[in-house]
Image (cartoon, helix red, strand yellow):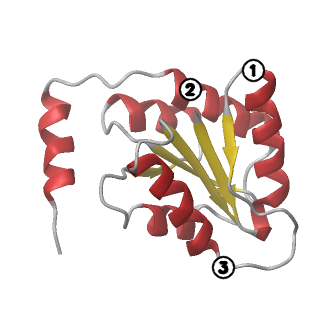
Amino acid sequence: MICIGSDHAAFELKNHLRDYLINKGYEVKDIGVDSPISVNYPKYAEKVAREVASGSCQYGITLCGTGIGASMAASRVKGIRCALCTNTFMARLARQHNDANVLALGGRVLGNGLAEEMVDVFLNTEFEGGRHAVRVAMLDDIKD
């Protein structure tokens, strides 16, 4: 299952990607928002991250205006490796090298087509492991 959530600035892209994923056969949990009325992005990014961290969802997609704030908020949840991506190369390496489990996207900076491509690459790229596994373990061991 894929969890998806956004703030008001990415409401339209979130809905587009939700429908896109459902049409491709994915099971999607949409945690909001349900309108373009202004909300605080950390709340929704945290909800996505917690769904993934708990194991309820395999991957998450969090969106805000630029993706920056959502990526910062999601990455604060233990066990989350959230990657802010702006192109397919970044989405591929986020999975291959960093075993990212949440993808952050910017609703005000991406068109639907590129966002679809990045989601496809992210969801269909396997983690390479090997030397990267050591680095991912180091990320997971970072504490305050």
Is 121 on the left-hand or right-hand side of 30?
Answer: left
Amino acid type at circle 2 is Val
Is 29 on the left-hand or right-hand side of 88?
Answer: right
Secondary element at image label 1: loop
Instruction: Identify the residue at horizontal 73%, vertical 78% (top origin).
Output: 39
**Residue designated by label 2:** 121
Label 3 environment density (alpha carbons within 10 Å; few <14, some 14–19, many ≥20): few
Is 21 on the left-hand or right-hand side of 57?
Answer: right
Label 2 environment density (alpha carbons within 10 Å; few <14, some 14–19, many ≥20): many
**Residue designated by label 1:** 24
Q: CA distance from mark 1 to mark 2?
A: 13 Å
Residue 139, horizontal then vertical, whole percent? 20, 52
Label drawn at residue 40: 3
Disc 1 + disc 3, Cβ < 8 Å: no
Residue 114, horizontal then vertical, whole percent? 72, 36
Instruction: Identify the residue at horizontal 67%, vertical 44% (top origin).
Output: 29
Which of marks 2 and 3 precedes in the sequence? 3
Which of marks 3 and 1 precedes in the sequence? 1
Q: CA distance from mark 3 to mark 2?
A: 28 Å
Amino acid type at circle 1 is Lys
